[in-house]
Image (spheres, rainbow, N blue to C red):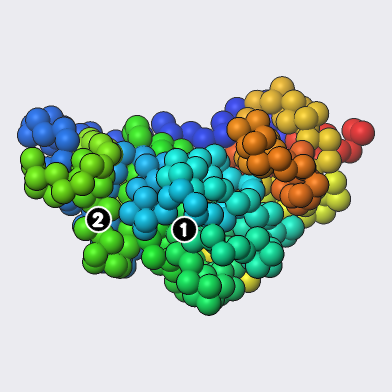
């Protein structure tokens, strides 16, 4: 290995370098919004919906305020509510579960897969009851769940399959993109996501014409035309500024996804002989898009501190498995009910990952990790 610096700043995510790389395009797009002075709705939002529909190969894209709203609106418009149960993964961001509760339904947590860390398809059956109405499959970290099993499970029990794609833009399973397996799927465009806006934004996608109408109506106060409120809804809209930012970024997403994959490959190559850590495994026949590059490691707190002192920012997604959070105390679970998620919460560490990460930054990070374990 070549000579390594004593100190190199490696941010966890670097949005500025990406902005600099598309500055001219981005500044022009943002200026065009100011020229028109239309900040809510309008042709730019329609254009982004069209652009994303084309890129994704889906019939309907309904933009909304954020990824959390998109999940809630889908669940609500599928008629999920009090008396129903909805299953979701025990390791995710709380949006995946809190939106289930918001509809009045009960969230049923399912443990995660010991190798791939996303919803464990083999655990669905034992959680099924006569009240189960839907499964929210979360493609965590950019890794798609085992969709053959999950789809057929949902089909055979007449359950709605909803995909939380907040971390899996353009991930694939057997050649099909994440988000195209279920009845409808939700996306977040939070700035740090693989396709990120410059503020909050999200969308829903579906190939179901009737559902698409409902989703749009509910997100716009229950009205498809101004003042014609057919139902009560919510206010969840994508700002015009976010729409143009996303349309610009969408033109570059393939390159950025490839860069993430190349970075993961390099991390794997440099770290594979470190016996104290387990590298992320890719589910066969899938394309992992590495929203996060997550290792399992020994002595996580001290490793993270060691890296931080050397300029390397890491993070944990997530430090407490959902069922172990205070918010879910009322479900009376014990950590042993979710052995995999509970074990992961103390061992996982997300290393810096973003398209503009340099080879030098990856080498430096890997080298510091090796030094940490050699010292001990
Ligand atoms: C980011 C995220 C969300 C929520 O998205 P917001 O746009 O922040 O509301 C939902 N689910 C998962 C898995 C996420 O990572």
- Residue located beneath label 2 in the image: 214
Q: Position of residue 354 (x, y in %)?
A: 51, 43
Whether residue 42 is visible = yes
Q: In the rendered view, does 18 fall on the left or right side of 107?
A: left
Is residue 245 or residue 235 the one in the foreground? Answer: 235
Q: How many marks?
A: 2
Q: Position of residue 51 (x, y in %)?
A: 24, 56
Q: Are there few (<14), some (14-19), or many (20+) residues within 10 Å of tag 2?
A: many
Q: Residue at x 37, y 50 (%)?
A: 76
Q: Residue at x 49, y 52 (%)?
A: 83
User: As drawn, which residue projects farthest toward the top?
Assistant: 309
Whether residue 174 is visible = no
Rendered view: 370 above or below 11: below
- Residue located beneath label 1 in the image: 163
Q: Secondary structure at mark 2?
A: helix
Instruction: Return the mark for residue 227.
Output: none
Q: Residue at x 29, y 43 (%)?
A: 64
Question: Disc 1, disc 2: CB below 8 Å?
Answer: no
Q: Position of residue 274 (x, y in %)?
A: 82, 49
Q: Secondary structure at mark 1?
A: strand
Q: Are there few (<14), some (14-19), or many (20+) residues within 10 Å of tag 1?
A: many
Q: Position of residue 198 (x, y in %)?
A: 34, 33
Mark 2 beta carbon near ligand 1 (under 8 Å): no
Q: Quadrant of residue 305?
A: top right
The answer for how far apart the CA atoms under marks 1 and 2 are is 18 Å
Q: In the rendered view, does 142 fall on the left or right side of 244?
A: right
Q: Residue at x 80, y 29 (%)?
A: 302
Is residue 116 or residue 324 the one in the foreground? Answer: 324
Q: In the rendered view, does 47 fall on the left or right side of 8?
A: left
Q: In the rendered view, does 67 fall on the left or right side of 172?
A: left
């Amino acid at each position: 290995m070549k000579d390594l610096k004593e100190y190199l700043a490696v941010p966890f995510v670097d949005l500025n370098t990406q902005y600099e790389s598309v500055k001219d395009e981005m500044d022009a797009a943002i200026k065009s919004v100011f020229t028109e002075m239309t900040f809510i709705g309008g042709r730019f939002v329609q254009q982004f919906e069209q652009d994303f529909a084309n890129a994704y190969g889906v019939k309907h894209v309904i933009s909304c305020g954020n990824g959390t709203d998109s999940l809630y609106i889908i669940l609500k418009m599928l008629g999920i509510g009090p008396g129903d149960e909805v299953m979701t993964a025990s390791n995710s961001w709380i949006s995946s579960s809190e939106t289930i509760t918001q509809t009045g339904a009960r969230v049923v947590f399912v443990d995660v897969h010991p190798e791939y860390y996303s919803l464990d398809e083999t655990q669905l059956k034992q959680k099924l009851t006569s009240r189960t109405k839907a499964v929210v499959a979360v493609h965590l970290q950019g890794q798609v769940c085992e969709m053959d099993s999950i789809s057929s499970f949902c089909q055979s029990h007449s359950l709605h399959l909803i995909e939380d794609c907040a971390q899996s833009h353009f991930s694939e399973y057997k050649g099909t993109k994440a988000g195209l397996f279920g009845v409808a799927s939700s996306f977040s465009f939070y700035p740090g996501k693989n396709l990120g806006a410059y503020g909050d934004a999200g969308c829903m996608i579906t190939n179901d014409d009737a559902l698409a109408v409902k989703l749009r109506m509910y997100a716009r106060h229950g009205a498809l035309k101004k003042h014609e409120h057919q139902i009560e809804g919510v206010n969840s809209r994508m700002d015009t500024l976010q729409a143009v930012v996303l349309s610009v970024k969408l033109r570059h997403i393939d390159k950025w996804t490839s860069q993430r994959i190349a970075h993961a490959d390099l991390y794997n190559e440099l770290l594979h002989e470190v016996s104290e850590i387990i590298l992320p495994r890719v589910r066969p026949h899938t394309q992992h898009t590495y929203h996060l590059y997550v290792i399992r490691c020994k002595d996580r707190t001290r490793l993270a501190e060691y890296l931080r002192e050397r300029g390397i920012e890491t993070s944990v997604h997530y430090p407490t498995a959902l069922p172990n959070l205070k918010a879910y105390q009322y479900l009376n679970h014990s950590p042993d009910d979710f052995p995999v998620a509970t074990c992961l919460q103390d061992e996982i560490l997300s290393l810096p990952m973003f398209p503009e990460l340099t080879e030098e930054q990856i080498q430096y990070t890997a080298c510091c990790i090796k030094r940490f374990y050699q010292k001990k």
